[in-house]
């Protein structure tokens, strides 16, 4: 990048567009946009900082995601690229986009079935988790936990397919 | 009060919460590959991951408060037992599955309430970490409470084991909701709750689960303490020996 270009401050839209195809390393069908974890973009003459919300505090993907954002910003020649971990407000599955939910279902992961409110989390109203393959509502929870912190294990009582459910938080 | 002493107290307060999280995470990690069934192996590993994540966020913050350049790793791996401030309950050995579940249940019944209160702390960073963690611990506690009931109200054998576990750990439950100088400082500064204010709710929650599980609430009133001052049970040293071995034997090694 030459000096003249470096002095132009990139717009947030440009930067977001440059990050648009970055994916979650554990559920690569989802982009960071689908997950709703790019919270803000700050661009000044001094540099570009992107605020990234971790999904779960201990999620090992967080560092990989931050590294991928930094690498992309560097590749595109942004000055002083940096990321900042945004803890407040805490990430919720409510931030997963409609596109993201559709992609999850296509991928074989049942998308979150309710809002991540306290009520839903305590299981007060029983939510119906639909089988991502045959759409049946007759499913059984095998375990509240799965292969990553964000998923629970289910099976479909109709088509008998075992599947994962992206739990509400 | 000078800012320097405030920082010392805040450091101490944050390290306590971090130490509880790290020691719990280390204990739960010991279960990986040894769970009674695959689903529980995954559950305990997930719990451990949440706790270690919380510990990392808190140690990083503590290091910044202290301003002496100590990183999360320095605080986790290069302090000795007497410098750890976790409550005695969390360092107790895993024992059988019932004892691990009982320990998690008794601790999380407190920890959830603490985090709930910290989420409205006037310390913004602590509030943000707590607001994130409270969602995770709420999920854990729902799971551990279910297991207390399933084992308590299960077979004769599972009930005996769960009752034994509750009886054995009971003496370590008093420390959590008993304030010392640091807790009182935090409460007066609007940083944390008065620990005693969490006790009624803790009691009600625990009693409710014990009664549903057909378990007896232990009668002993004598409570062990010392964890917050760094006086630990002998199990703590063994836990650190395993956790810190690599950094102690090969300082600054990374991979």
Image (cartoon, grey):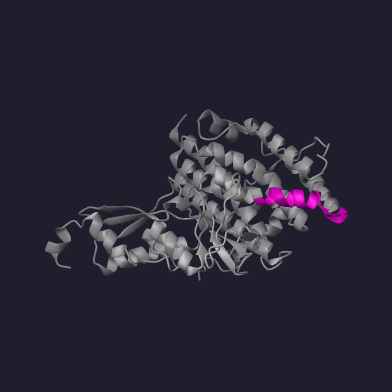
Examine the structure image and report whether residue A128 is included in the region drawn in magenta.
Answer: no
**Image location (x, y in percent) of residue A122:** 60, 45
Residue sitting at x 75%, y 58%: B97
Examine the structure image and report whether residue B151 is included in the region drawn in magenta.
Answer: yes
Q: What's drawn in magenta, residue-wise? A: B143-158
Between A51 and B69, the residue placed more toward the observer is A51
Residue sitting at x 41%, y 63%: A65
Q: Quadrant of residue B217?
A: top right
Q: Quadrant of residue A62?
A: bottom left
Between A135 and A1, the residue placed more toward the observer is A135
Between B127 and B234, the residue placed more toward the observer is B127
**Image location (x, y in percent) of residue A112:** 50, 55
Q: Identify whether A157 is placed above or below B103.
A: below
B221 sits to left or right of A112:
right
A89 sits to left or right of A75:
right
Residue sitting at x 57%, y 47%: A121
**Image location (x, y in percent) of residue A103:** 43, 65
**Image location (x, y in percent) of residue B232:** 70, 48
- Numbered-mark total: 0
Q: Is residue B7 visible?
A: yes
């Amino acid at each position: 990048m030459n000096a003249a270009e470096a002095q132009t401050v990139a717009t947030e839209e440009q930067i977001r567009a440059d990050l648009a195809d970055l994916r979650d390393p554990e559920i690569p069908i989802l982009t960071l946009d689908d997950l709703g974890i790019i919270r803000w973009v700050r661009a000044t003459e001094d540099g570009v900082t992107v605020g990234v919300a971790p999904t779960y505090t201990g999620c090992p993907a967080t560092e990989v995601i931050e590294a991928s954002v930094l690498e992309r910003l560097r590749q595109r020649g942004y000055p002083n690229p940096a990321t900042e971990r945004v803890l407040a407000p805490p990430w919720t599955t409510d931030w997963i986009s409609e596109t993201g939910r559709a992609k999850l279902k296509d991928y074989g992961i049942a998308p979150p079935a309710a809002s991540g409110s306290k009520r839903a989390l305590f299981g007060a109203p029983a939510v119906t988790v639909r089988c991502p393959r045959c759409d049946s509502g007759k499913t059984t929870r095998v375990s509240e936990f799965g292969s990553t912190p964000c998923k629970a294990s289910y099976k479909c009582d109709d088509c008998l397919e075992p599947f994962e459910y992206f739990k509400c938080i | 009060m000078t800012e320097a002493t405030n920082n010392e107290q805040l450091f101490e307060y944050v390290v306590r919460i971090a130490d509880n999280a790290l020691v719990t995470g280390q204990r739960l990690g010991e279960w990986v590959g040894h769970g009674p069934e695959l689903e529980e192996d995954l559950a305990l590993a997930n719990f451990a991951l949440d706790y270690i994540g919380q510990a990392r966020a808190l140690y990083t913050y503590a290091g910044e408060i202290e301003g002496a350049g100590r990183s999360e790793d320095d605080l986790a791996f290069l302090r000795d037992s007497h410098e750890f401030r976790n409550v005695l309950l969390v360092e107790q050995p895993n024992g059988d599955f019932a004892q691990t579940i009982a320990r998690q249940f008794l601790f999380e019944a407190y920890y959830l309430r603490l985090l709930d209160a910290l989420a409205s702390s006037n310390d913004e960073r602590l509030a943000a970490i707590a607001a994130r963690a409270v969602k995770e611990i709420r999920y854990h506690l729902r799971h551990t409470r279910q297991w207390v009931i399933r084992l308590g109200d299960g077979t004769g054998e599972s009930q005996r084991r769960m009752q034994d576990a509750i009886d054995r750990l009971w003496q370590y439950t008093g420390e959590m909701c008993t304030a010392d100088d640091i807790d009182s400082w935090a409460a007066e500064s609007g940083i944390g709750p008065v620990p005693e204010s969490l006790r009624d709710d803790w009691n009600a929650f625990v009693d409710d689960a014990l009664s549903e599980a057909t378990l007896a609430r232990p009668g002993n009133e004598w409570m062990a303490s010392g964890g917050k001052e760094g006086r630990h049970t002998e199990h703590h040293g063994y836990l650190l020996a395993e956790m810190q071995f690599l950094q102690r034997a090969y300082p600054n090694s990374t991979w």
